[in-house]
Amino acid sequence: MRKSLPVIILFAILLVVGTFGYMYSEGIDFWNSMYLTVITITTVGYGDMVPKHASGKILTALLIFCGGGVVMYTFSKITETMVEGRLRNLLEKNKMDKRVMQLNDHHIVCGFGRIGMEICQILSANNKPFIVIENNEEVVKEIEKHGYIFMKGEAADDDILLKAQIEKASSLIAVVSSDADNLFITLSARVLNPKLYIMARSSGATGADTKLERAGASKVISPYNIGARRMAQLLIRPTVIDFIDLTMHAGELGLRMEELLVTKKAPMANKNLIESGIRQKYDVIVVAIKRKGGKMHFNPGPKTIIRPGDILIVLGEHNQIIALENEV
């Protein structure tokens, strides 16, 4: 709009000057004067009206000269805007394509509504690679403002999922507005990557969870059910819920609950909890241990062996957990 304003002002000035100039020099009415001004500025010149007096001819010459300059300036600005816009869009698209191609072991978030936005904020805060798939043009503009990697299109489209590097992804989160859409996304994703971890949002309607699981969802979440249970637990066990919030959201005390994968090179591998020195060295509590097969050991004893491939659920201060994470 700012680039168009000078052109609009120039046209308005020429139109006003020409109209009143012809009314004065040629003695014709307002509408005929405006008509003559327009065909002169645009250099159309139908020939049905021509200036007869010397002052009118001089005005015509000035309008043609100025009008030609305005027209050339207008076309140059239009061309400049088109070229700049297309070039900018092309560069941005190429840049985004490169970022997408570099993705590996990432998360695919399908839908950028209230839930999708919150998921992306948490993933971004924890430096986890992810890509958003969204079809709504206005929502896509919002994603661009956040600087997230994204693709515009239908998340159930195989081509879109393949371009989002689904074959190299670690998980897919289907959180679009309807159960039917989440079902189609889950079906498509499961076919393209049989080993993919798929989390799907459910409305909680009867049979929705079962259908999503049959379609291939690894985990089905109903925000409404979770919200209802949480509200009830706040009434019954408020202190427990406050403690969980503190550990999950890293409150003022810096307390944090985290999961850490034990590698073969970890110094605590194949040692029991006492020998590992986790509590003594890092002042971190091992709340649970998840084995490779999926079995969970809660409140493990001091003689419990830590094996490579185990996932330690630990509780402690943020800095201490970071130090332990560097060891495993």
Image (cartoon, helix red, strand yellow):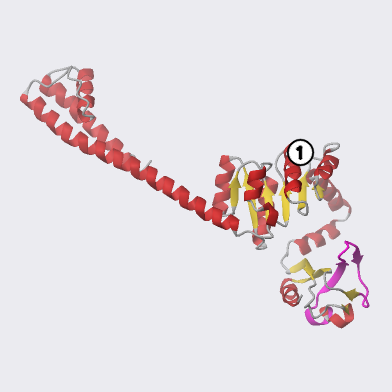
Highlighted range, magenta: 279-304
Q: Position of residue 146 (x, y in %)?
A: 57, 53
Name the residue that disc number 1 marks.
Answer: 179
Quarter assignment of residue 159: top right
Q: Position of residue 98 (x, y in %)?
A: 55, 57
Quarter assignment of residue 7: top left
- Residue nearest the observer in this picture, 11 or 81: 81
From this view, report whether residue 133 is shown above or below residue 102: above
In the rendered image, is residue 22 in sight? Answer: yes
Badge 1 amino acid: Asp
Residue at (15%, 26%) from the top-left corner? 21
Quarter of the image with the C terminus in it: bottom right
Quarter of the image with the N terminus in it: top left
Residue 299 magenta-drawn? yes
From this view, report whether residue 151 is shown above or below residue 15: below
Residue 44 magenta-drawn? no
Q: Pointer 1: residues within 10 angstroms few (<14), some, or many (20+)?
A: many
- Residue nearest the observer in this picture, 257 or 251: 257
Residue at (86%, 37%) from the top-left corner? 207
Q: Is residue 237 left or right of residue 105?
A: right
In the rendered image, is residue 112 in sight? Answer: no
- Residue nearest the observer in this picture, 284 or 124: 124
Q: Position of residue 97 (x, y in %)?
A: 55, 53
Residue at (51%, 50%) from the top-left corner? 93
Q: Is residue 22 left or right of residue 95?
A: left
Q: Position of residue 276 (x, y in %)?
A: 84, 80
Residue at (78%, 46%) from the top-left corner? 223
- Kindly give the residue lying farthest to the left in the view shown: 54
Please tell me whether mark 1 sits on a helix, a strand or a loop. helix
From this view, report whether residue 128 is shown above or below residue 56: below
